[in-house]
Amino acid sequence: MSDLHGNYDAYVAMLEKIKFSADDTLYVLGDVINRGPDGVPILLDIMERDNVVLLMGNHELMNLNPFEHLSLMEYDHNLDSEVIMEVTEYTRIPFDSQTLFDFARLPLAEKKSLNEYLQGLPLYLETEIGGQKYIMAHAGLNVDAREYSSAEIEEGIPQWAREKSGSEAVFIYGDKAYSASRESLVWSRHDYNKEFFPDVKIITGHIVTRQVDPNSDGGIVRMNNNIAIDCGMGFRDGKLACLCLETGEEFYTE
């Protein structure tokens, strides 16, 4: 699932709907905070679950600096908007006041723990389920994703790029390889019109499915080995989607 945007009730309803258990693994492709009222409670719940994997979304990324700053301070329930404004001015990051208020009011130890958890969120995930390979990221690979030539692949350049430290991710499958920056993986619009790999499906959130495919009924969109799962939970009339990677079954809550 992806793009919960603070809708805790929809999150809990989805866990109940899919009968989520200790035998399952849930992948959440970022943006669980902001817009809705309960992003911090969702984060705390996810953090405590060993079988839920959260990826970095642009809304988590935007809050890293404010969370880092607030985790160094002890506040009580009388925290006011002036303090929040001071933090956002200091960090130069746009903010969602409810998210920052809720985070700042946590006990100091809990703030530190949650901040450390968020700082370590992965930008993407590669996995294989039932023989099908998947790449998961909040935003995905945009039109500027670099495609390596066959000569470069033969020379091992993509593998070298993958192993070097830096902000790029490099995906190598068969005779195709692409690099993606953090900007692409977290912020940019995925290129749904392109099939990047013939045998690998790329799953993304970030862009509401009705924008990916204007003819969509608002549900999950699949095209060119790309799967878009942000069904607009963060907006009016949106819904939360969950896709079972073992069966292909789709689940929805509002």
Image (cartoon, rainbow, N blue to C red):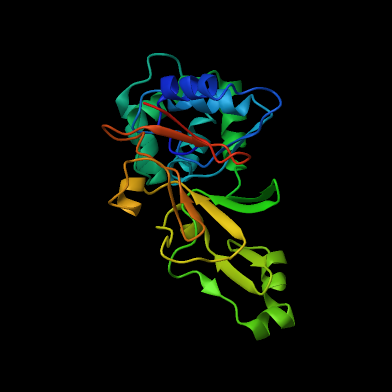
Q: Is residue 230 above or below residue 52?
A: below
Residue 82 is left or right of residue 201, and the answer is: left
Q: Quadrant of residue 85?
A: top left
Which of 213 and 89 lies nearest the eye of the viewer? 213
Residue 61 image position (x, y, % from top left): 48, 45
Q: Is residue 11 above or below residue 208?
A: above
Q: Who's the residue at 33% across and 32% down the image?
A: 35
Evaluate whether residue 74 shows in this view.
no
Evaluate whether residue 226 shows in this view.
yes
Q: Is residue 171 above or below residue 52?
A: below
Residue 217 image position (x, y, % from top left): 31, 42
| Residue reaching furthest to the top | 77
Which of 159 and 218 lies nearest the eye of the viewer? 218
Residue 8 image position (x, y, % from top left): 44, 22
Residue 250 is left or right of residue 235, and the answer is: right
Residue 97 is left or right of residue 220, and the answer is: left
Which of 49 and 127 lies nearest the eye of the viewer? 127
Q: Who's the residue at 27% across and 32% down the image?
A: 237
Q: Quadrant of the C terminus?
A: top left
Number of numbered tags placed on the structure image: 0
